[in-house]
Image: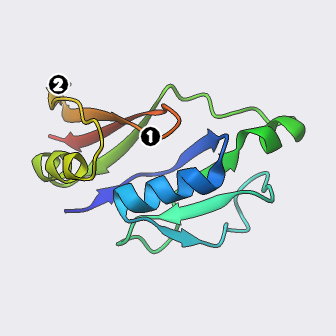
């Protein structure tokens, strides 16, 4: 079972705690922040899913973004895809997350989780 996404940018009060959550939850790996990513900050952490060749997740310190006068990400819901929704649901449940029920969204099925700072994340499988 694999997780994947195009790109996610999330802000946190504690980037270190967020990094640990992503590693523990999705087995993400820390990578060097790519030079071509916009507005790099000292506290930025780039992550990739285990099967990915390049990072697709950027964790930013909320305070540093505010100091740099950068706009925070505008997403209300962040989306991660997986190839097997039932296995993903079971796996995340066994890792101690409060995992919502699997729902039908028309052309996708999904469930919702929240990270350590309350960001809403939908884990989806396209039908």
Dot 1: within a 10 Å radius of its alpha carbon, few (fewer than 14), some, or many (20 or more) residues?
some
**Residue drawn at 70 percent across, 57 percent down:** 44
Q: Closer to us: mark 1 or mark 2?
A: 1
Within 10 Å of disc 2 (Cα), the crowding (few <14, some 14-19, many 20+) is few
> Relative to the observer, which residue lies in front, 67 or 116?
116
Residue situated furthest left in the rendering: 86
Whether label 1 touches label 2, CB < 8 Å: no
Up-down: is 29 above or below 12?
below
Q: Above or below — where is 27 with respect to 62?
A: below
Relative horizontal placement of residue 111, taking residue 62 as reference (left or right): left
Residue at 35% x, 72% y is: 51
Q: Looking at the image, which residue sits at the far front?
A: 96
Residue at (78, 56) in percent of width and height: 40
**103 horizontally vs 7: left or right:** left
Q: CA distance from mark 1 to mark 2?
A: 25 Å
Q: Which mark is residue 106?
A: 2
Q: Secondary structure at mark 1?
A: loop
Instruction: Identify the secondary structure beneath mark 2.
Output: loop
Q: How is the image coloured?
A: rainbow
Task: Provide residue 98's location: percent of width, then percent of height.
Answer: 28, 36
Taking the image as shown, residue 17 lies to the left or right of residue 43, namely left
- Could you tell me residue 1's position as x and y percent? 19, 62
Which of disc 2 and disc 1 is earlier in sequence? 2
Q: Which residue is mark 1?
A: 115
**Relative to residue 126, is residue 104 depicted above or below?**
above
Q: Name which quarter of the figure residue 97 lies in.
A: top left
Q: Percent from the top left, x then y, of residue 70?
A: 81, 37
Q: Relative to 123, is 102 on the left or the right? A: left
């Amino acid at each position: 079972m694999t997780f994947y996404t195009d790109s996610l940018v999330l802000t946190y009060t504690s980037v270190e705690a967020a990094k640990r959550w992503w590693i523990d939850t999705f087995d993400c790996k820390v990578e060097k922040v790519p030079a071509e990513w916009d507005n790099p900050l000292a506290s930025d952490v780039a992550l990739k899913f285990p099967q990915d060749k390049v990072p697709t997740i950027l964790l930013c310190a909320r305070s540093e973004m505010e100091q740099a006068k950068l706009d925070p990400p505008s997403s209300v819901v962040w989306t991660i895809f997986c190839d097997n929704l039932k296995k993903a649901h079971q796996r995340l449940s066994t890792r101690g997350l409060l995992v919502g029920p699997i729902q039908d969204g028309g052309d996708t099925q999904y469930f919702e989780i929240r990270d350590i700072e309350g960001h809403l994340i939908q884990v989806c499988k396209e039908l």
